[in-house]
Image (tube, rainbow, N blue to C red):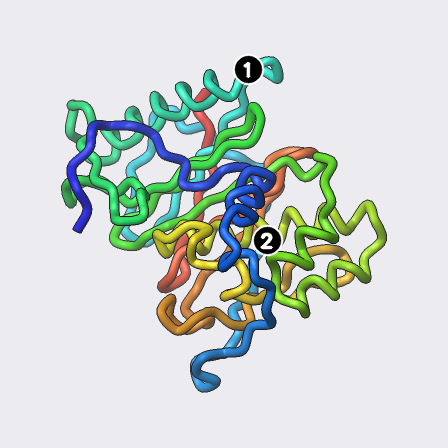
Amino acid sequence: MPSPASFRCVAGSASCARGANRLTAGSAAATHRSIRPENPERSMPSVIQRLHVDAIEVGTPWPDLADDEVHLWLEQLAPSASAREVSAFGRQRLGQLLRHYSGIDAEPALMHNEHGKPQPGIDRYPRFNISHAGPMLALGFARSTEIGVDIENAQRSMRSHELAARFFTSAEAEQLAQLAEPLRVLGFMRLWTCKEAVLKAIGRGLSFGLDRLAFDINADAWPHSLLHIADEAGPASEWQLHQFEADAAHVGSLAWRGSPRRIRVLRKL
């Protein structure tokens, strides 16, 4: 059972590098293995959709959140903004949006599950998730279903081949290794956001295991579909995944389990 906690913004996802550091610290999580569907009859894939954000709605006045919608808010602070400033802005924006969606003009009361994921304290609050990378902030909201969002800087320098071989499935690592170097990092980051968005929607984060869900990747470095996921997360076919490019440098993914919903991409004027 989640325990009451004072209002605070917990992204539920660190950057890819910090996440890899946490995995490295635990030998069990860092053990590389090839995934096999725990129940082959439940292994129908889920095709990943691309979400185009070039026509972002200006949320003025802020729209209501319908039961069949998902709202993705994208905010970009000044490039000079520190991580602390982005985090503080995220807390402020999250509180504003929860008050708007719930109609409760009071500081949001949140709970945290046993894995530390923040959750609404009362039913009138929608489910939510938040992520940031550099000056870019992403917030996802949905009613009656858990949601996960992750955003990362795809232009960062990293040893993507080593990280993929250590933490992803062997098939994913092989597919990434076949890509030319400029695409390899991009494909790695896109795949990372897919995995983390799903794990955040599950409510477990990286402790669930990055190699317990498997994707395939096309020659353009886009994850194409969720092939398999551990049985405890439900059939792969029940998952909805949408990838987006917030700008030239940032890629992200949005995930939830359940029926397709209309997605509205928003920003504050």
Left/right of residue 92 with respect to residue 180 in the rendered view: left
Estimate the x, y position of residue 240 in percent, counting from the top left: 45, 60
Instruction: Name the residue carrying label 2.
Output: 50
The disc, 1 or 2, on the residue closer to the chain's N-terminal end is 2
Label 1–label 2 contact, CB within 8 A: no
In this rendered view, identify the residue nearer to me: 190 or 267: 190
- Checking the image for residue 81, the label placed there is 1
Q: Return the residue nearer the eye: 82 or 74.
A: 82
Q: Is residue 30 placed above or below 186 in the rendered structure?
A: below
Residue 39 image label: none
Residue kind at label 2, given as amino acid type = Arg
In three-dimensional space, the C-alpha distance between marks 1 and 2, rounded to whole angstroms, equals 29 Å
Outermost residue to the bottom: 41
Q: Is residue 164 above or below residue 86?
A: below
Q: x, y percentage for residue 256?
A: 40, 56
Q: Quadrant of residue 179?
A: bottom right
Callout 1 amino acid: Ala
Relative to the observer, which residue lies in front, 214 or 158? 158
Residue placed furthest toward the right: 180
State which mark lies toward you, 1 or 2.
1
State the residue at coordinates (24%, 42%).
112
Count of numbered badges drawn on the protein: 2
Say what secondary structure mark 2 lies in. Answer: strand
Residue drawn at x 44%, y 40% as measured from the top left: 72
